[in-house]
Amino acid sequence: MIDNTTNKINLKAYIDYCSSFDLVHDLLQKANKEKPTDKLSTMISAMRKIALYVNHLDGNISKVYAMAEEYKEDKIRAVLRARRSEDELQSLEKENLMLTDKFKLKL
């Protein structure tokens, strides 16, 4: 997962966005109730579309962070697996060298 600081920064930014959005949306709704106009209705509709789009982007960003973390974990596992394989190869090469030396001594 993304580090805790980045997560907190993103969460704060999203909360700020939501607060600002709610403030503007509520003001538009109130004005539209007091004196409905086509312009206010269009603005409210646009605000809702903006909210849907931002929520969609926020969801995609979360997916990207999750994918990046998964790739990072896969890379770490691959590196550890490669290191174990190298260690095992060195061990087998030493064993092979010892067995080869013993075989030569017997001849």
Image (tube, helix red, strand yellow):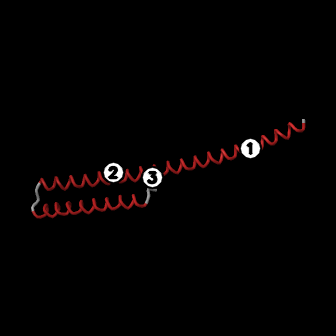
Q: In the image shown, does 20 or 83 lie closer to the viewer? A: 83
Determine crowd level at label 1: few under 14, some 14-19, many 20+ residues with C-alpha closer than 10 A.
Answer: few
Spatial separation of the CA atoms under disc 2 and disc 1:
52 Å
Task: Tell me the quadrant of the picture where the C terminus can be found.
Answer: top right
Name the secondary structure under disc 2: helix
Q: Residue at x 13, y 62 (%)?
A: 31
Q: Residue at x 38, y 51 (%)?
A: 61
Residue 20: which disc? none
Q: Within the image, what quadrant is residue 13 found in?
A: bottom left
Foreground tag (2 vs 1): 1
Mark 3 vs 2, N-terminal side: 2
In the rendered image, residue 58, in percent from the top left (x then y), is placed at 34, 53
Mark 3 vs 1, N-terminal side: 3
Residue labelled with disc 1: 92
Specify the amino acid type for callout 1. Leu
Mark 2 vs 1, N-terminal side: 2
Q: Within the image, what quadrant is residue 25 found in?
A: bottom left
Residue labelled with disc 2: 57
Q: Residue at x 75, y 43 (%)?
A: 94
Q: Residue at x 17, y 62 (%)?
A: 29
Specify the amino acid type for callout 3. Ala
Q: In the image shown, does 33 or 22 lie closer to the viewer? A: 22
Spatial separation of the CA atoms under disc 3 and disc 1:
39 Å
In the rendered image, residue 87, in percent from the top left (x then y), is placed at 67, 47
Determine crowd level at label 3: few under 14, some 14-19, many 20+ residues with C-alpha closer than 10 A.
Answer: some
Specify the amino acid type for callout 2. Leu
Residue labelled with disc 3: 66
